[in-house]
């Protein structure tokens, strides 16, 4: 399945769509790479959420890097499948902050 087919099936309501060239080196959990960033802003409804859940399945197939900051639905399973340096980041984080004094919504959601 591809993005165009998923769009035709679920007909999500997209309020904003943008493309942005990215550059840099993807390491640890940096949202950088020499790729194109595609951003969708949706109306939150059932069809949009169903569409996004199907898009999640494309991440591994097409080596897509989802934004853990902009997409609060991203869970730890998707995170560890798509961020190839996530385990290394988690190890370094625990070396730096052994007691995990600082925690954010994102770190809790991704169990960092």
Image: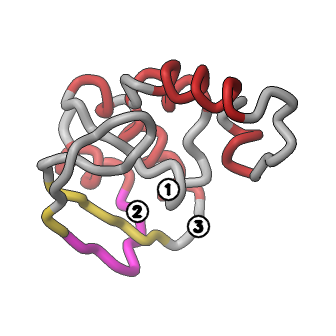
Give the residue number, with chain letter if any, for mark 1. 47
Give the residue number, with chain letter if any, for mark 2. 12
Tell me how far mark 3 sits from mark 1, CA to CA: 8 Å
Residue 68 in the image, given as x and y percentages of width and height: 51, 48
Disc assigned to residue 44: 3
Q: What is the secondary structure assignment of the residue under circle 1? A: helix
Assess disc 1: are there few (<14), some (14-19) or many (≥20) residues with their C-alpha within 10 Å of its C-alpha.
some
Could you say which quadrant of the image residue 91 lies in? top right
Prevailing secondary structure of the magenta residues: strand
As drawn, 17 above or below 100: below
Queried whether the magenta region covers residue 12, the answer comes back as yes
Callout in the foreground (3, 1):
3
Q: Which of the two residues, 31 or 93, is positioned nearer the viewer here?
A: 93
Q: What is the secondary structure assignment of the residue under circle 3? A: loop
Residue 93 in the image, given as x and y percentages of width and height: 64, 32
Q: Earlier in the sequence, mark 3 or mark 2?
A: 2
Tell me how far mark 3 sits from mark 2, CA to CA: 9 Å
Could you say which quadrant of the image residue 60 lies in? top left
Q: Quadrant of the C terminus?
A: top right
Q: Quadrant of the N terminus?
A: top left
Q: Which residues lie in the magenta part?
A: 11-19
Residue 86 appears left or right of 103: left
């Amino acid at each position: 399945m591809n993005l165009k087919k998923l769009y035709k099936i679920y007909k999500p309501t997209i309020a904003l769509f943008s493309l942005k060239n990215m550059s840099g080196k993807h390491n640890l959990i940096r949202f950088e790479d020499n790729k194109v960033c595609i951003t969708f802003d949706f109306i939150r409804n059932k069809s949009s959420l169903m569409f996004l859940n199907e898009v999640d399945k494309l991440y591994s197939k097409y080596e897509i890097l989802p934004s853990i900051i902009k997409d609060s639905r991203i869970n730890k399973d998707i995170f560890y499948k798509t961020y190839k340096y996530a385990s290394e980041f988690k190890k370094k984080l625990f070396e730096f902050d052994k007691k995990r004094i600082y925690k954010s919504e994102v770190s809790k959601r991704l169990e960092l």
